[in-house]
């Protein structure tokens, strides 16, 4: 059935929505890539109820900021945290439940660390429900002519599977290039994005340990 509300798709990829907003409606925002906030520091001036005052952000950059870099491959210098800049901020917005995890987790914002008075914030962030989903991309070779036309639809949902929930053909997205149909390219790849069910993702996550016996973070397998 058709959706009851409008559906919006980023032309050229969902990242274009964020880029367009940043360019047209938030031109004064500074984006820092390859940087991870690992601790937030509350500066002097905060009231007893937690209001007022300002914040300074500390973190890491480079390989230490990436989620899939094994801990044993990082030097001590790379692990060291420092103030990300000389700026202070009136507000800090947490957008990921993982930021409320302990410092062992690569996505932690250190909300519980070093006496940072943000335990109420961490509790609120950590209590937010989230539904994990796994995605993957598979590619099929398409031959020339009618036999290589591919599937006669652009997406489908699965209602009786415990593993697969949704699939969509990448080239059917707006502004994604169509594979050339000339005889010089007899075989082209047709790529599909597969999205798992939440039940499958939860079961897989439960089987994958994120800490070793010493409590150190274990990076995801590539």
Image: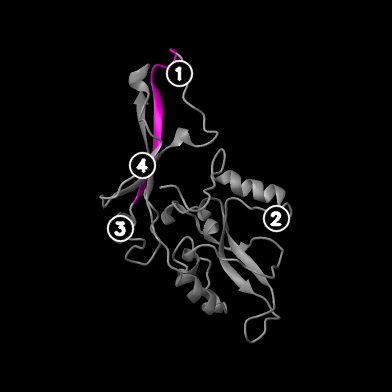
Which residue is disc 4 drawn over?
A: 156
Q: Nearer the viewer, mark 2 or mark 1?
A: 1
Q: Which of the two labelled residues, at mark 4 and mark 1, occupies the earlier sequence position? A: 4
Kindly state the secondary structure of the residue where label 1 is placed: loop
What is the C-alpha distance between the residues marked 2 and 1? 43 Å
Question: Which of marks 1 and 3 precedes in the sequence?
Answer: 1
Q: Residue 160's x, y, as percent?
A: 25, 50
How far apart marks 4 and 1 lie (CA) works out to: 25 Å
Identify residue for label 2: 29
Element marked by disc 3: helix
Part of the protein shown in magenta: 183-196
SS state under label 4 = strand
Which of marks 4 and 3 precedes in the sequence?
A: 4
- Residue at which label 3 appears: 199
Quote the CA–CA distance across marks 3 and 2.
38 Å
Q: CA distance from mark 3 to mark 1?
A: 40 Å
Q: Are marks 2 and 1 in contact (CB under 8 Å)?
A: no
Q: Quadrant of residue 215?
A: bottom left
């Amino acid at each position: 059935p058709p959706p009851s509300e409008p559906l919006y798709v980023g032309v050229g990829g969902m990242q274009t929505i964020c880029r367009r907003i940043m360019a047209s409606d938030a031109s004064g925002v500074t984006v820092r890539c390859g940087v991870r906030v690992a601790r937030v520091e509350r500066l002097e001036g905060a009231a007893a109820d937690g209001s007022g005052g300002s914040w300074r952000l500390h973190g890491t950059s480079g390989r230490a900021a990436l989620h899939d870099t094994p801990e044993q491959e990082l030097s001590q210098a790379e692990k060291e945290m420092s103030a990300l800049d000389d700026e202070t901020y009136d507000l800090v917005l947490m957008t990921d439940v993982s930021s409320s995890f302990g410092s062992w987790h690569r996505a932690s914002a250190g909300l519980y660390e070093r006496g940072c008075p943000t335990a109420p914030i961490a509790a609120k962030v950590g209590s937010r429900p989230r539904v994990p989903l796994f995605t993957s991309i598979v590619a099929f070779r398409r031959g020339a002519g009618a036999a290589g036309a591919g599937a006669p639809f652009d997406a489908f949902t699965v209602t009786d599977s415990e593993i697969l929930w949704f699939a969509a053909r990448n080239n059917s997205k707006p502004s994604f290039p169509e594979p050339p149909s000339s005889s010089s390219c007899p075989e082209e790849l047709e790529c599909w994005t597969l999205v798992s069910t939440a039940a499958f993702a939860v079961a897989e996550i439960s089987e994958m340990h994120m800490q070793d016996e010493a409590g150190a973070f274990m990076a995801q397998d590539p």
